[in-house]
Amino acid sequence: MTSNSFLRAARRTLTAGAAALLIGAATVPSLVMPAAADDGPASVADLAQGLLGAVVNISTSQRVKGTEGPGAVPMPQLPEGSPFQDFFDDFFKNRPGEQGNPSQKVQSLGSGFVVDAEQGIVVTNNHVIADADDIEVNFSDGVTLKATLVGTDTKTDVAVLKVDPKGHKLTAVKFGDSSKMRVGDWVMAIGNPFGLGGTVTVGIVSARNRDINSGPYDDFIQTDAAINRGNSGGPLFNSAGEVIGINTAIISPSGGSIGIGFSIPSQLALGVVDQLREFGETRRGWLGVRIQPVTDDIAESLGMATAKGALVAGVIKGGPVDNGTILAGDVIIKFDGRDVNEMRDLPRVVAESTVGKAVDVVIVRKGVEQTVKVTLGRLEDGEKLASGENGNTDKDTGDEAPAVPTASVLGMTVGDLNDETRTKFGIAAEVSGVVITEVAKDSAAAERGIQAGEVITEIAQESVATPKDVMDRIAALKEQGRKNALLMLASKSGELRFVTIRMD
């Protein structure tokens, strides 16, 4: 079935009055729009009928401890033989938390869909089954099967379940290519809103590549097809009956649909589902860098014509590029042939890449574009390595200065980084540069959130070690006609970030 036959908007014929209004012997023509070719929208009944069997309701239960304590209401003391005794026994003694009933069963409902009928594989949202003790899959014909958890991914909110394929004849649906969907294309959502059971709604793709700050790989399809509570984990179909999204979130002040729903695109979900099925966990590519956005000020400071790419704020020790391949201050503009237009593009394309794959990375270093070869690590291993970097303790460097020479520049007072200043601000021994001892209120530095105790390690991608170095670099930038100074700052524990400061 083509998208044109999937749903055609009803056209209306507008008239300003009767076909002809007789006034005396004269006629006044009315305003008549051309007649529509069809009387109304085409039915989607055949398409929905073929898909309903593959969409399931997910019901979960979790046993939680009952509440006790000062807030609990005590059972009243009643006279022996009171006619209200049975009533109060039922109400108080059977409450969660009372002796003999230490817990209660909390249930929730969501949606899912079968992707492999032979293996009994069902896909849903992670938040639908999170912390569940029991999971059941309910089919449209009333059959219910127990499900086991194959794997989950909290970063994309995807979960894979398995049911016994011998327990029921299963109908499966296929993933489609979400990258081919355009704004305005018709889509159909099927799910379990408010626990009502299989419900079909139709709408269009309202927007693509939505970032709603729910995770590191946000790239949602936005749709106006009605999505409500209980639709989570259900499929979003294209006109061919292929799953191009997993319905996962809505924006609504009331909890009901207001026409703003979000689906995980199949292009992202499919790789996660395959990894969960094969390994029971995700195995994402890892570059081993910390990044931040490239603002207009940073682009100007780096000599870039336009603000694009991801600025490398630091390189994780022991990571794939801890060999000098990529350096702090580099701007990554292309990864494995895919453009990196914004910072948020990079984590997604790296995570979608195969662990151990050698890829070409295009960077801008000191205004010069170049290509480097990088072999990717595994993100899950890298997260453990990155978390260990913050466990550094201060060490005695053996360098003591009898005095702390200082200088004032750009609203900051800077000084030598030695034992005295390290101790005063709690700066790790591995951090090097020039310490910021004071930041003037309402200065350009204060506006950028710079604080005393941070350390300037580079200015305009040149290392600085003394307050004089800082003064000289700022003076040189002003002579070059630069409007902003790009500073690489290190936190007390050594985490890096880039900041631009106006020099006017």
Image: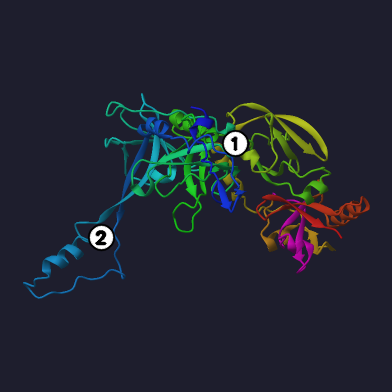
Q: Locate residue 86: give its quadrant.
A: bottom left
Amino acid residing under circle 2: Gly
Q: Which residue is mark 2?
A: 97
- Note whether 134 is above or below 500 in the view shown: above
Image colouring: rainbow
At mark 2, the secondary structure is loop
- Quarter of the rendering occupied by the C terminus: bottom right
Instruction: Report whether residue 16 is seen.
Output: no
Furthest toward the left, the residue is 81
Q: Is residue 474 left or right of residue 88?
A: right
Q: Which residues are magenta?
A: 430-457
Q: Which label lies toward us, 2 or 1?
A: 1
Amino acid residing under circle 1: Arg
The numbered mark at residue 182 is: 1
Q: Is residue 13 left or right of residue 435?
A: left
Q: Is residue 471 magenta?
A: no
Residue 339 vs residue 232, the one in the foreground = 232
Q: Is residue 321 left or right of residue 97?
A: right
Instruction: Report whether residue 45 is seen.
Output: yes
Furthest toward the top, the residue is 118
